[in-house]
Amino acid sequence: MAQIEYINLADLNLPQFQAHTNINPEHIKEISESIKSIGVLEPLLIRDTDHGLEIVAGCVRYKASMLAGLKAVPCINMSLDPKAAEIVKLHENIKRIPLDHVDQGFTFLTMMKEFNMTEQQISESVGKSIAYISQHISLALLDNEITQAVKENRISFSQARELMRVDNKTERNRLLQYCENEGATVRVLKNWVEDYLRESSTSPIPESQPTEQIYDYNDPQTARLCEACGKSVEISKIRQVFYCPECHKSIGDAISDEKNKLSSNIPEKDS
């Protein structure tokens, strides 16, 4: 059984990488008030390093104890190498104060960079799927707009996961603004993203690649096909209008319906 010993707070060091990057000060204050009344009920997990005693799990309790004016706290000294310490730290953090999705992503990323762990190894260590690990790492690597929005709970991780399917940063941020301003559900956002991906996949193919579509104009730089009637129109005469993905689809469906009605009303020629 692990032995508990009281260690002076002055002799303890916070780890170089702390999983929680945005703990609410009010939360630490609440814990400190509890510590003043009944003390530290759960020992901190620590380990020996070349730089002294390092906290493996219990950084929040450490800070709350400092705030409460304690001189020493109960600790359990564990024989852990840096890699094992990160795994224990991750388990402890998920169990006690759940890491937000961004902090999880940066933790997984640290495990890959510092300890050369693969997504498979991280998955086995923390009991999460490989897809879960990969998605959170992608979120951490993405950009400040999306990660900050998740961090501040302006969008959910499920919404961020849909946005990460869009590789164009400008389009991704445009859809992010829709999410925040219009309160788009994950289902609506998914439709927007799929519309964008579908349109991107049907964009003109570079000249260096063969194309199966034959246009009825000679110079693709001076004309485009009208989406409604299919006629070739000079670019100088084209009028550009902006629609959200849902309206764009509705207008396209309405045009298709009208074309079908016209086709069905054309009388057949006598043989």
Image (cartoon, rainbow, N blue to C red):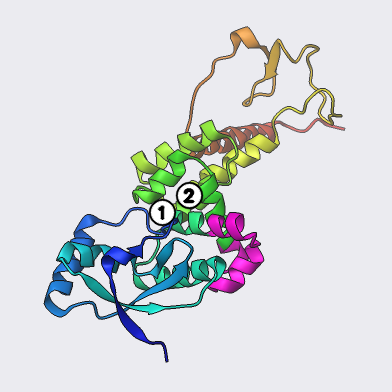
**Viewer-nearest residue: 87 or 265:** 87
How busy is the neighbourhood of tag 2: few (under 14 within 10 Å), some, or many (20 plus)?
Answer: many
Q: CA distance from mark 1 to mark 2?
A: 6 Å
Q: Quadrant of residue 133?
A: bottom right
Q: Position of residue 204 (x, y in %)?
A: 73, 27
Q: Which residue is mark 1?
A: 156
Q: Secondary structure at mark 1?
A: loop
Residue 78 vertical position relative to residue 236 in the rendered view, above or below: below
Q: Is residue 167 left or right of residue 153?
A: right
**Viewer-nearest residue: 255 or 30:** 30
**Viewer-nearest residue: 242 or 149:** 149
Marking on residue 216: none
How busy is the neighbourhood of tag 1: few (under 14 within 10 Å), some, or many (20 plus)?
Answer: some
Regarding residue 29, the answer to whether it shows in the image is yes
Q: Secondary structure at mark 2?
A: helix
Q: Position of residue 91 (x, y in %)?
A: 46, 72
Q: Residue at x 81, y 12 (%)?
A: 218
Per the rendered image, the range of residues in magenta is 108-132
Residue 154 vertical position relative to residue 248 in the rendered view, above or below: below
Q: Quadrant of residue 32?
A: bottom left
- Asked if labels 2 and 1 touch by Cβ distance under 8 angstroms, the answer is yes
**Viewer-nearest residue: 268 or 184:** 184
Q: Which residue is mark 2?
A: 160
